[in-house]
């Protein structure tokens, strides 16, 4: 049985707590955070505390706080024997200020109030010590079948790739919604297409899946599209992305 | 029973044929196209012909050919009594050169060889005559529960919105794959995130779903990301999309 303490009370902390309390091999001893109110949601299966000087003894401490706060929070754990791991895609292993350090990064977007199935979520782990890595692997495999050992440089690049396929993609959905609303159309119309576009690259590479006027270098259609756009940032985006698609396919040839 | 003829032998023609042959209320009489070899795949449940002067009498003619060829193909139908409808998102109703004209536009991305469930796919119909519109509605509802009457201007804007959420989004997936490969990581790692990002906007608006450094105006994280990017077009895209996200959220406030 691996005994863990979760530090932080945000979105990720809650999703990790929800996942770990259902496992047999992991015991969530305690959740520690500044805000008493936010701590309440963890009180059913763990002890809760807002005192960072009263953290329980555990095998692994999961620091699920904002990137800027990782270093500071980890200092409270400097006298602990257990492994201290942060959960950030963007931060180095060395953001942790203790000797026994690690990273436990679930690569997914988490939404408050919506349950997630961790079993397929990639969990990226990193540690210097072999034993630490094994503890993280045990922890990760208790909730996911998709566990990867990657280093800090790889993780940072992966986090950046996630910004493109998640944050930036979501912005394109927003533009789609804006264009629908300009014509009094519902965003509902685009939802099946959005899903199928995401489904398609589950079974073929994005370069193979690419379609559209830019892919065909269909200048007439692109000209017509540009005439329909009103907002300057939509026009700039249309031109830039069309040019990039055209170039990517010329490189392929 | 609605008797239809499909003109064209491409990807959409095949998906429409596959959908209509399973319905009770629609009979696919004939498929007409230039290429004898491409016609063979339609021979099981319809007669096939490569002679545009030997098109059967039918209630509806679905012109599922490239945008540039719609006008020309429709001329072969000028003596027919039946309704002639094209299937393009980008073309006007008037691209059809016959009196009894319409549009039957399924808003989805179709992949060769991969079966689709039409039941949830939005089918956008348009016609001048009330009877024609009713024929298109009968045709559309025989395969989909998601049928919308929209005009040519609305459809063109919708088609443009589809370019953003499908073609451009797919390109961002490609960038994600490139960034993974730079670090020797598999694109597999991003697939669950891609799906969840698409799933998220099925239940909340993209503006609500937006996360990431640009949304938070986290200059430090954005600076770190820009340092990790090597390709000029990735840097330009990162800056432009981050700026657009920042601006969209300032407008919301």
Image (cartoon, coloured by chain):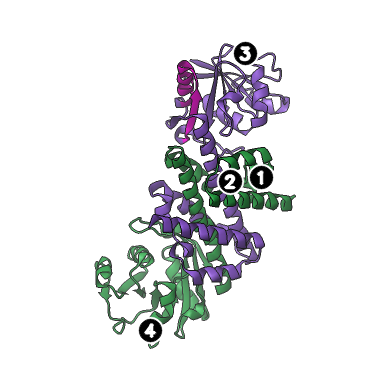
Chain colours: A purple, B green
Q: Quote the CA–CA distance across marks 2 and 4.
A: 48 Å
Q: Do the residues labelled 4 and 1 touch (CB within 8 Å)?
A: no
- Residue B198, given in percent of the width and then of the height, sits at 52, 48
Q: Quote the CA–CA distance across marks 3 and 4.
A: 81 Å
The residue that label 4 is drawn on is B77
- Residue B251, given in percent of the width and then of the height, sits at 73, 53
Q: Quote the CA–CA distance across marks 1 and 3.
A: 35 Å
The residue that label 1 is drawn on is B215
Residue A167: mark in rendering: 2
Point out the stretch of residues depicted in magenta: A121-140
Q: In which quarter of the image is residue A248?
A: bottom left
Q: Identify the element where label 2 is drawn.
A: helix
Asked if one can make out residue B14 in the rendered structure from this viewpoint, the answer is: yes
Q: Identify the element where label 1 is drawn.
A: helix
Viewer-side residue, B244 vs A16: B244
Q: Do the residues labelled 1 and 2 touch (CB within 8 Å)?
A: yes
Of all chains, the one bearing label 4 is B
Of all chains, the one bearing label 2 is A
Q: Quote the CA–CA distance across marks 3 and 2.
A: 36 Å
The residue that label 3 is drawn on is A56
Disc on the earlier residue, 4 or 1: 4
* Quadrant of the image containing the C terminus of chain A: bottom left
Number of numbered tags placed on the structure image: 4
- Residue A153, given in percent of the width and then of the height, sits at 52, 33
């Amino acid at each position: 049985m691996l005994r863990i303490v979760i530090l932080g009370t945000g979105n990720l902390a809650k999703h990790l707590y929800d996942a770990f309390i259902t496992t047999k091999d992991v015991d969530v001893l305690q959740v520690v955070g500044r805000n008493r109110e936010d701590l309440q949601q963890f009180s059913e299966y763990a002890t809760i505390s807002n005192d960072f000087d009263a953290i329980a003894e555990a095998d692994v401490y999961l620091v699920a706080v904002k990137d800027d706060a990782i270093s500071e929070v980890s200092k409270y754990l400097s006298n602990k024997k257990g492994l201290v791991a942060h959960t950030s895609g963007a931060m180095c292993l060395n953001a942790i200020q203790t000797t026994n350090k690690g990273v436990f990064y679930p690569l997914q977007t988490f939404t408050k109030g919506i349950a997630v199935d961790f079993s397929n979520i990639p969990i990226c782990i990193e540690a210097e010590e072999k034993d630490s890595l094994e503890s993280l692997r045990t922890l990760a495999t208790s909730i996911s079948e998709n566990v990867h050992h990657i280093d800090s440089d790889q993780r940072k690049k992966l986090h950046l790739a996630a910004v493109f396929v998640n944050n930036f993609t979501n912005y394109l959905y927003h533009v789609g919604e804006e264009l629908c609303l300009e014509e009094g159309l519902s965003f509902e119309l685009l939802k099946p297409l959005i899903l199928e576009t995401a489904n398609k690259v589950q079974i073929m590479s994005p370069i193979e899946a690419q379609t559209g006027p830019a892919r065909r270098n269909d200048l007439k259609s692109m000209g017509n599209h540009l005439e329909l756009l009103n907002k300057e940032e939509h026009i700039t985006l249309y031109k830039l992305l069309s040019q990039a698609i055209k170039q990517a396919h010329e490189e392929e040839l």
